[in-house]
Image (spheres, helix red, strand yellow):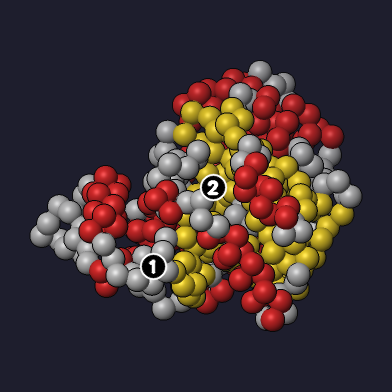
């Protein structure tokens, strides 16, 4: 089969969306995104389509290929087509199919981005960093080495553009993908843990814990809880006493700022001093982070009172039945706290990096 590698910059976004939902349709973590949510994902992670590439079919499209794409989209998008609003099925032709990448790597780009290397207990700083925001191949075309070809192509291109770091995440049990990255010289920086809990159970647990704490009555009189504007969020997240360790790309300050209208951020103050800050994505109940000042008094640390108050306040702002917290590393005290309040660890990932 004849193929070609092209930048995704000039491809209509709807065709990239079709490729994305088909490619991740059988992924271990179910990916169900509307077109609007897909655009939101690209914005959140600072995906630059000019630095992202895909593999495209470069030959005449046969009937089997046409049927494959149409059948997949009929299953995954049973609602009326975005293109043909008068029909219940998306109709494709050869020209349209040639705009759908059969394999792709979506790359985010940021300047002055840092990650935490757990083994060496140090911060790694990159002046220009790429982030793999999605590597996938349509099931029908797997096993042909497309991901390897794209990765090689992007690494070569990035070096020419003086990009000095490439960051990605891979499921811990995905040995095939992990070994591919290792073969290119990637190193594991840290292990990420992903948690979720039912909101109703979480509210009950937190309320019960706070009710049984003798310190809470005195503490509640001393603290002030404030919902933040974007300007204040930017101001307070510069506090180095709170953000000593780096947060993952998806949960970073940059990601939160990108979609702040869809986020609620809460800060807790004691005697006008910031002692904690958190953020939640309103629609899906994804906690971006819970950051606690490392220099707070011991009374605030006792029984995770501050974390409990902050989390309970944040989850008021989502109607989602489930609360999730993705990509927590071992260095974060939040991990122990979540396990105490019965969050379930449902999957783990490795963060990996390549010095370019």
Residue 99 shown left or right of residue 248 in the figure = left
Question: Local crowd at mark 2 within 10 Å, few (<14), some, or many (≥20)?
Answer: many
Q: Position of residue 347 (x, y in %)?
A: 60, 35
Location of residue 305 in the rendering, given as x and y in whole percent from the top left corner:
70, 32
Q: Which residue is mark 2?
A: 280
Q: Where is residue 324 shown, x and y percent of the image? A: 54, 38
Circle 1 packing at 10 Å, graded few (<14), some (14-19), many (20+), is some
Of residues 302 and 153, the one drawn nearer to the viewer in this rendering: 153
Figure quadrant of the C terminus: bottom right
Quarter of the picture containing the N terminus is bottom left
The residue at 42%/69% (across/down) is 2
* SS at badge 1: strand
Image coordinates of residue 238 in percent, x first then y, are 73, 63
Q: Is residue 227 above or below residue 157?
A: above
- Name the residue tied to disc 1: 57
Q: Is residue 216 visible from the viewing direction of this image?
A: yes
Tell me, yes or no, whether the two marked residues, 1 and 2, touch with CB atoms within 8 Å. no
**At numbered mark 2, what does the secondary structure look like: helix, strand or loop?**
strand
Q: Please report the residue visible at 26 percent of the width from the left and 45 percent of the height from the top.
A: 75
Which one is earlier in the sequence, the residue at label 1 or at label 2? 1
């Amino acid at each position: 089969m004849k193929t070609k590698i092209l930048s995704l910059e000039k491809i209509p976004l709807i065709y990239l969306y079709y490729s994305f939902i088909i490619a991740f349709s059988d992924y271990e973590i179910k990916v169900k995104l509307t077109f609007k949510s897909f655009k939101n994902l690209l914005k959140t992670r600072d995906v630059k389509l000019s630095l992202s590439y895909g593999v495209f079919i470069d030959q005449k499209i046969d009937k089997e290929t046409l049927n494959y794409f149409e059948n997949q989209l009929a299953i995954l998008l049973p609602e009326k087509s975005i293109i043909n609003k008068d029909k219940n099925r998306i109709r494709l032709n050869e020209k349209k199919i040639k705009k759908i990448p059969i394999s792709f790597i979506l790359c985010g780009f940021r300047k002055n981005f840092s990650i935490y290397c757990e083994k060496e207990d140090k911060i790694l700083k990159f002046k220009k960093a790429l982030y793999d925001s999605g590597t996938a191949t349509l099931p029908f075309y797997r096993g042909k080495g497309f991901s390897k070809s794209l990765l090689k192509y992007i690494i070569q291109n990035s070096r020419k553009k003086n990009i000095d770091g490439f960051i990605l995440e891979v499921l811990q049990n995905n040995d095939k993908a992990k070994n591919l990255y290792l073969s290119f010289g990637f190193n594991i920086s840290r292990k990420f843990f992903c948690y979720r809990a039912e909101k109703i159970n979480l509210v009950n647990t937190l309320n019960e814990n706070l009710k049984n704490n003798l310190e809470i009555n005195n503490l509640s009189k001393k603290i002030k809880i404030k919902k933040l504007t974007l300007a204040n969020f930017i101001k307070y997240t510069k506090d180095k006493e709170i953000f000593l360790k780096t947060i993952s790309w998806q949960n970073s300050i940059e990601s939160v700022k990108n979609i702040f209208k869809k986020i609620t951020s809460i800060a807790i103050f004691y005697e006008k001093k910031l002692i904690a800050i958190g953020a939640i994505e309103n629609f899906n109940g994804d906690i971006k982070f819970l950051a606690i000042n490392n220099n707070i008094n011991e009374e605030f640390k006792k029984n995770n009172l501050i974390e409990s108050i902050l989390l309970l306040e944040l989850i008021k702002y989502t109607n989602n039945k489930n609360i999730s917290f993705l990509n927590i590393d071992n260095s974060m005290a939040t991990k122990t706290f979540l396990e105490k309040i019965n969050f379930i660890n449902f999957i783990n990932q490795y963060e990996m990096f390549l010095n370019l």
